[in-house]
């Protein structure tokens, strides 16, 4: 599968991602465990959105010089559409993260580290799945119909599942960890492992990391076919995914306190997935313009958010597994 990007563009993008992760990890270590305020989350969210649109401006400028303005316009539009779709799907991802954190009663000051590792895992998983998806589409054109049908099925399933709390007790990953590892009854700071009565155990924070990783895999399975319905260019697919994920941690803390206000957003996401899946199924009959996809995505999400503000939610999620943080004098971990 051919890409519009030159080797230099690939190298520069890779260096940028590595630098961004290094800065994020450095800031995480320097700040230590702390509760992220709405102001801090809002500032970082704006920074990541600004960086994303600065990138698309750079992409448009470079491609305009290499391929001409028509190609530059088309690729920039593909990036923006893919970015918005992935960002929207990431919002649903965030609500699942919130459910996991609530279920395990993860202290707010520990959530930042968990999300950092979750983002790192998501970047690696997305890159692998994008490469595999590009190879499959190149060698088996019919896989596009399978992707399309899967997106339609996922959208319908999301519609009917909206408002239903997942049963974490029945989660296979959680059952596997409990069967094969001893789990501490409480937290030990930001440690993933601790020692209790001479026995080395995993802390609940480690279990949360495992479940967040599983969530990343599940959502990658949904989002990768969605972006391939918008563009077949691996560079646009990867960059739009990466920029959507890089701002995920800040967006989580920004939206975590407002998840009930946007309780109808999942319905909007379901409609978007069905639309994108239908677009992929029709790809050999009629190619829906990227501009139309962008318009439908923005309109549906905007309407679902406005209706969420007008229609009050019903019910509130509750913690079903109340772990607690250990006091400093109780710590005997490593």
Image (tube, rainbow, N blue to C red):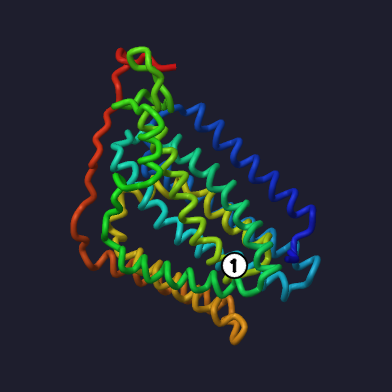
Residue 298 visible within the image:
no
Q: Determine whether the residue tagged by mark 1 lies in a helix, strand or loop.
A: helix
Which quadrant of the figure has residue 69? bottom right
Residue at the farthest front position: 179
Residue 274 visible within the image:
yes
Drawn side of residue 83 relative to residue 90, left or right? right
Write the residue at 43% across / 37% down: 112
Drawn side of residue 12 relative to residue 127, left or right? right
Write the residue at 67% across / 70% down: 140
Determine whether 101 is above or below 193 in the image. below
Which one is in front, 235 or 131? 131
Report the number of numbered marks. Answer: 1
User: Badge 1, how many Cα within 10 Å: few under 14, some, many 20+?
Assistant: many
Which one is in front, 263 or 226? 226
Q: Which quadrant is home to the N terminus? A: bottom right
Determine whether 77 is above or below 315 in the image. below
Drawn side of residue 75 relative to residue 263, left or right? right
Determine whether 56 is above or below 67 in the image. above
Write the residue at 64% across / 67% down: 76
| Picture coordinates of residue 187, whole percent (x, y) | 33, 26
| Picture coordinates of residue 235, whole percent (x, y) | 68, 60
Q: Which quadrant is home to the C terminus? A: top left
Drawn side of residue 123 relative to residue 315, left or right? right
**Residue at mark 1:** 228
Which quadrant of the figure has residue 18? top right
């Amino acid at each position: 599968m051919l890409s519009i990007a030159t080797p230099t563009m690939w190298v520069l993008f890779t260096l940028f991602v590595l630098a961004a992760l290094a800065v994020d990890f450095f800031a995480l270590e320097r700040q230590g465990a702390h509760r992220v305020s709405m102001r801090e989350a809002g500032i970082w969210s704006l920074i990541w959105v600004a960086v994303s649109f600065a990138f698309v401006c750079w992409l448009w400028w470079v491609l305009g010089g290499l391929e001409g303005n028509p190609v530059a316009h088309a690729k920039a539009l593909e990036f923006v559409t893919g970015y918005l779709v992935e960002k929207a799907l990431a919002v649903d991802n965030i609500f699942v993260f919130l459910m996991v954190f609530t279920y395990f009663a993860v202290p707010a000051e520990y959530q930042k580290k968990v999300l950092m590792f979750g983002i790192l895992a998501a970047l690696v998983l997305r890159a692998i799945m994008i490469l595999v998806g590009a190879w499959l589409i190149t060698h088996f054109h019919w896989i596009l119909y399978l992707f399309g049908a899967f997106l339609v099925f996922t959208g319908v399933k999301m519609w009917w599942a909206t408002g239903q709390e997942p049963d974490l007790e029945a989660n296979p990953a959680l059952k596997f960890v409990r069967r094969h590892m001893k789990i501490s009854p409480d937290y030990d700071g930001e440690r993933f492992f601790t020692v209790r009565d001479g026995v080395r155990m995993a802390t609940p924070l480690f279990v949360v990391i495992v479940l967040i990783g599983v969530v990343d895999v599940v959502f990658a399975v949904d989002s990768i076919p969605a972006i391939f319905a918008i563009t077949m260019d691996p560079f646009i697919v990867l960059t739009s995914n990466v920029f959507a994920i890089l701002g995920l941690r800040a967006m989580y803390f920004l939206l975590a306190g407002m998840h009930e206000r946007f309780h109808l957003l999942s319905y909007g996401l379901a409609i978007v997935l069905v639309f994108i899946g239908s677009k992929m199924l029709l790809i050999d009959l009629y190619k829906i313009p990227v501009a139309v996809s962008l318009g439908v995505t923005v309109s549906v999400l905007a309407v679902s958010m406005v209706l969420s503000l007008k229609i009050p939610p019903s019910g509130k999620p509750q913690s079903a597994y109340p772990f607690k943080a250990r006091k400093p004098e109780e710590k005997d971990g490593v």
